[in-house]
Image (cartoon, rainbow, N blue to C red):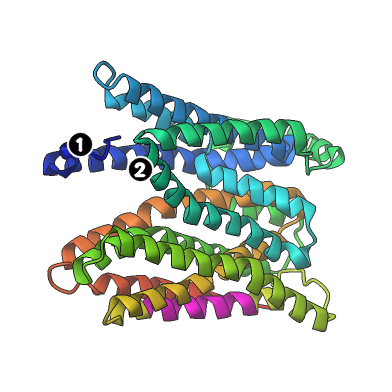
Amino acid sequence: MFGPGDDDCGIAEVQSRVAKLQTGINLTSGLLAAVVTPYLGRLSDIWGRKALITITSLGSIINEVLFIVVDRNVNTISARWLFLGAFFDGISGSFMAAMALSYSYVSDCTSPALRNSAFGYLDATYSIGLALGPTLISHLDLRLGIPTLPFYIALGCHVLYVVFLICFVPESLSQERQTLARQARDLKKSSWQSSISELNPLKLIAAVKSHEPDRPDAYLRNLILLALADTVYFGISVGTTNIIILYGGFVFGWSDVEISGFISATCICRICALLLILPSLNFLLRHESSAPHTSGGRVDTIDLYQVRGALFLSVLGYSGYAIAPSGAAMLVSGMVAALGDISSPSLQSSLTKQMPEEYTGQLLGVMGQLHALSRIAIPTMMNMIYAKLVGIFPQGVFLCLTAGMVLAKGCTWFIGS
């Protein structure tokens, strides 16, 4: 919240206090989201997706309003009030719940064969925002000189999104499915113990096994391996950007220009992969294959091959980070790793195909919980490793990240197709 002319930004003590404040805000929001997201996912199976998506957006609106209020009264209101915004953001599920519920909405509207492409389109919109948002904001800030402009724009976008959602977006979950879910819920006794047990991801598997006892053991194995691969991949993807910014500046002397160029180039590759390559692969492979959608604990073969190929590109890209002799080689490695992002929608799609449709929201809510936890744990570990190795062997952090990608890819080789 400092303007271009504020020399305070360069003071080490200020940087330290800002970093601690940001860490506390992220932990508050992230931990609350990890607790709340499974419940929101389960409720979306009962009351529909639209209402729950709106709730997640309302938390973000309150958070942005508090940021603006604190900034406009910086001399009279403590920055600790920002934690209240993080509380509302987290208690409404934050970004993790919004994505999980959006995936559930898309899953309701698409056939299993085309679901990973639809998920890819959703991921691509996020990448487009990531690529264009910072650039647009920086240009507007330079022209208008308003450091808090991003908060006003974010608030306006959230409000417009809620209005559009309420007025124009139809509910994806049929009244029949909602009624059946409510009837199933009413048959179960509710208690504090049962509510707390919802935080256990394995509870979902037990519920499905009791609902369909004839499901083979391969179902359980595949579901756990898919969830593990997706969680590890997501946590590494989220935690890599900050490491690359620090590493690029330390090893290659990157300035803001080079960092912005790296982020833009990798985002463009990611968008092309999600909007062009993944749909093209689906069209070609599924057009040639007449195999029906697999069930009974087996994973769609085409999805599985796509995941394995994409994770191979991720391993290749992260290995390139570790051995890159120049900034150009680092950029090429980043572009290769970005192409591997088609694994994310394919993994999510495969997970939904393993579950009965009445559990879709609950499943993706659990995955949102795992994503929220990995978003906290893996970047924290990577930052600690980098801090320890930066003066000795800074490339070591990328070897650790590569090992994580190898683990994710290794999980896919034990999945039955």
Q: Nearer the viewer, mark 2 or mark 1?
A: 2
Name the residue located 36 percent from the left edge and 54 percent from the top edge: 377
Q: Which residues are magenta?
A: 305-319
- Check residue 409 for magenta coloring: no
Report, in whole angstroms, how far the alpha carbon at label 2 lies from the one at label 1.
14 Å
Magenta: main secondary structure equals helix
Q: Secondary structure at mark 2?
A: helix
Q: Nearer the viewer, residue 306 or 148?
A: 148
Name the residue located 34 percent from the left edge and 80 percent from the top edge: 329
Residue type, numbered disc 2: Leu
Q: Secondary structure at mark 1?
A: loop
Q: Quadrant of the N terminus?
A: top left
* Place of residue 242 in the rendered image (x, y in percent of width and height, measured from the top left): 32, 58
Residue identifier under label 1: 6
* Place of residue 74 in the rendered image (x, y in percent of width and height, measured from the top left): 27, 22
Residue identifier under label 2: 142
Q: Which of pointers 2 and 1 lies earlier in the amino acid sequence?
A: 1
Name the residue located 77 percent from the left edge and 51 percent from the top edge: 108
Examine the image and state in which quarter residue 205 appears. Answer: bottom right
Residue type, numbered disc 1: Asp
- Check residue 312 for magenta coloring: yes
